[in-house]
Amino acid sequence: MALPVLRSVLPVLLSATVIVASGAAPAAASPAPDPVLATLMPVPAGQLTVTAVDAAPLGVIAGTASVQVTNPDGTVSTVSTPQRWARVPRLGWVRQPLALPDGATSGVVDGLTNAIEAAGRVTVDGVSRAVRWSASGLSSTLIGDAATGVTAVGPHGPWGVATDTAQLPASGYAELVTRDGTRTLLAGTPELDAGYRRTVGSIGGPATALVWVTDGVGMGTTARPVLWVSGATQRLPVVSSYFLRSACVSPVLADGSVVSSGYTIDGGTVALVMVRHVGGVPGTNVELSRATAAGQPVAGLACTSGFKPDNLAADGGIAGFVTDAEGTRAAYWNAANERTLVPLAAGERSAKGVAVANGGRMVIQAEAEDGSVRLSLWHNGLLRSLTTPDGWSVSSVVELTDHRLLVANVRDASGAVRPAVWEL
């Protein structure tokens, strides 16, 4: 849709939550609810890769469109443009390209505030700069120095700004930037200063953030998650390294609650754990699973490389998986840490919970015997199939909102990627 038309419908973006949430909930009495077919989002002409990264509670989606172009000298480069989508009455889903600041040649979105303000990075004079857009999407503000980008967005701000690892791989700082420009450097505690680079992973509120701290070189590189609350810090028990698989950490909530899974090293003993941390800093670790020997049951969170996980709901529900002698199955933990295992459906060889929302709703991503990927919504013991349009398959799940909107990225046989939405 052309930008002038979008300007005329922008006032209704803020009412998108009414549209998304107006449908009645699926009838729990039906043993086999009807499948829900995804809707493909409109994309710019000629774009090969269009990827959604976040969805606001109002039902607005943000992402990036990327296309490869051949330069005059014959080299090939990628040009990216920031995008936003909203469902508008009588028009359906409409797309809005976000305005680039003066001098910028491309832009990438990382996340949205609850007020649908996108943020990410733009390229100016060949260098990335952290940026946030207005709620209208028609103006933007640079909020970082050269070689920075926004890596996390708070519900109402602040914005997590960190150095661009592609441009400064061996060093870097991270800070929280508020709407009025106040900057809080994330440094000065033993946990934050235990590495040479810090990146904001998620923000739960004005004074709560999750920070990844990187140290070491080559195969000795490690990344450790640190919880930051009002200047105090607490390192979470898991670690990512070359020799141990990557740790997975949920988004941090405003009260400092966070869930992590992966390997931990305690007194020389290596264990595979899943831990809920509550109470902020210092807080308390509640172990949900621990395995120290082969063959033991393992529980964990599912993290897709390059995308932020959506595995901890505001009401404390957790989406994850359990691997034991019967295979890998999706699992749900409620706020009281009571676990429910979801049996594999016919034709499935493994499944994991990959997104969660309030009220015990979980999206399950399953691998079928033929290698295909299936999505379903689990709620109150019932599964509802989530299907894609013909010719498209699920590439990555982005988010399940509390207003029953599931956002994912899908791929066709040519390799083209675009966002898709299920209204549940």
Image (spheres, rainbow, N blue to C red):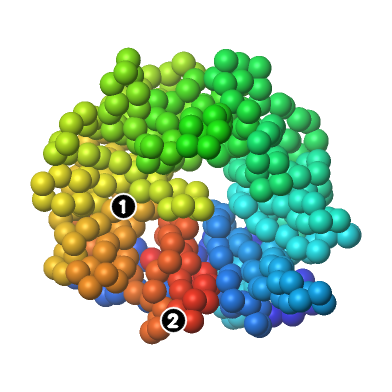
Residue position for label 1: 353
Seen as rendered, the residue at the extreme right is: 102
Q: Is residue 145 left or right of residue 325?
A: right
The answer to whether residue 316 is above or below residue 350 is above
Confirm whether residue 218 shows in the render: yes
Decide: is 402 above or below 182.
below
Whole-angstrom CA distance, mark 2 to mark 1, is 26 Å
In the image, residue 414 lies at what x, y percent? 48, 81
Q: Quadrant of residue 275?
A: top left
Label 1 amino acid? Gly
55 relative to 70 in the view: left or right: left
Relative to 37, does residue 167 appear above or below in the rendering? Answer: above
Residue type, label 2: Ala
Q: Earlier in the sequence, mark 2 or mark 1?
A: 1
Q: Nearer the viewer, mark 2 or mark 1?
A: 2
Which part of the image, by quadrant, shows the N terminus?
Answer: bottom right
